[in-house]
Image (cartoon, grey):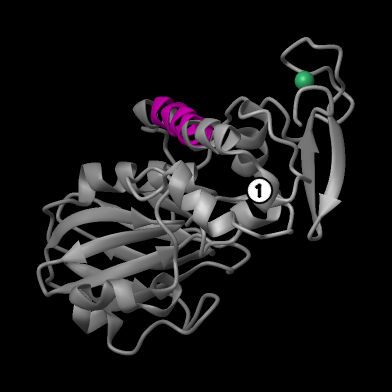
Amino acid sequence: MPELPEVETTVRGLARHLEGARIERVALNRPDMRFPFPEGLVQALTGARVTGLGRRAKYGLVHTDRATTLVFHLGMSGRWRIDPGACDKHDHFELDTAGHRFALCDPRRFGFVDLVDTAALARWPAFAAMGPEPLGPGLTPQHLRLAFAGRKQAIKLLLLDQRIVAGLGNIYVCEALFRARIDPRKAAGAVSARALARLVPAIREVLEQAIGDGGSTLRDFARPDGELGYFATRFAVYDREGLRCARDDGGTIRRIVQGGRSSWYCPKCQK
Ligand SMILES: [Zn+2]
């Protein structure tokens, strides 16, 4: 499932070929993905020039010179293919520029696209109540201290709450808590200011490392399928149940379930 680093890598890969280009053809190969394609999407994008790309949480943004933004979400299995050799039956949405074809391929169809007035993006329903970007200036120890004050829920669960921090998913929350030496079960309101001061850079580091790993994939993405967005990165605790802690402290990585999802942590060094 694509998390923030995969979306960021996808956006950067698309930007290389799409930024500044005019969209000459738009094709919808079925009526819907997770949601129906917005009405008038083909006419709205055909002939538009892409002025820039961006990302908010796990959403990719394609801004056009018509004051509209194409928002895309990759769902569980979505990925963009650039210049795919042959059409895949899961290529649901296609954009052609003079030089390239971009196909949004999504076998499970949990992904979707929407078209939003660029000026109204911040009020788009999914964005309206979202917290700060984890890589932006809004995420500070002070922000977390205020958001967590008096909260008894486990810190792991509150870090997944998009209203507190936007775009953090299970893998990177586990990794950041390990890096900051915080027990994922600890009541958020009881986490010390000192630990929160470790957590903010830990969040940025795990995301930036993964984006870096994706970037190294991008450099050789001139594969025939041209797929963007999936790459291998190294994890310290994620999916490492029963293995020795990377800190070599005698701890063994443990898996527990919180809010219906797995958490991995080292009971020895995460307090
Ligand atoms: Zn440990």
Q: Residue at x 65, y 60 (%)?
A: 150
Quarter for ligand 1?
Answer: top right
Magenta stretch: give its range: 202-216
129 over 253 or under it: above or below: below
Near mark 1 (Cα within 10 A), the count class, few <14, some 14-19 or many ≥20, is: some
Q: Is residue 177 left or right of residue 164?
A: right
215 is within the stretch colored magenta: yes
Majority SS type along the magenta span: helix
Q: Is residue 99 left or right of residue 186?
A: left
Q: 28 or 17, which is in the foreground?
A: 17
Q: Residue at x 87, y 22 (%)?
A: 252
8 is within the stretch colored magenta: no
Q: Return the residue at label 1.
A: 170
- The image quadrant of residue 235 is top right
Q: Is residue 67 left or right of residue 152?
A: left
Position in image of residue 257 (x %, y %) = 85, 51
20 over 248 or under it: above or below: below
Q: Residue at x 89, y 26 (%)?
A: 242
Position in image of residue 141 (x %, y %) = 47, 42
Q: Is residue 88 left or right of residue 50?
A: right
- The image quadrant of residue 57 is bottom left
Q: Amino acid at mark 1?
A: Asn
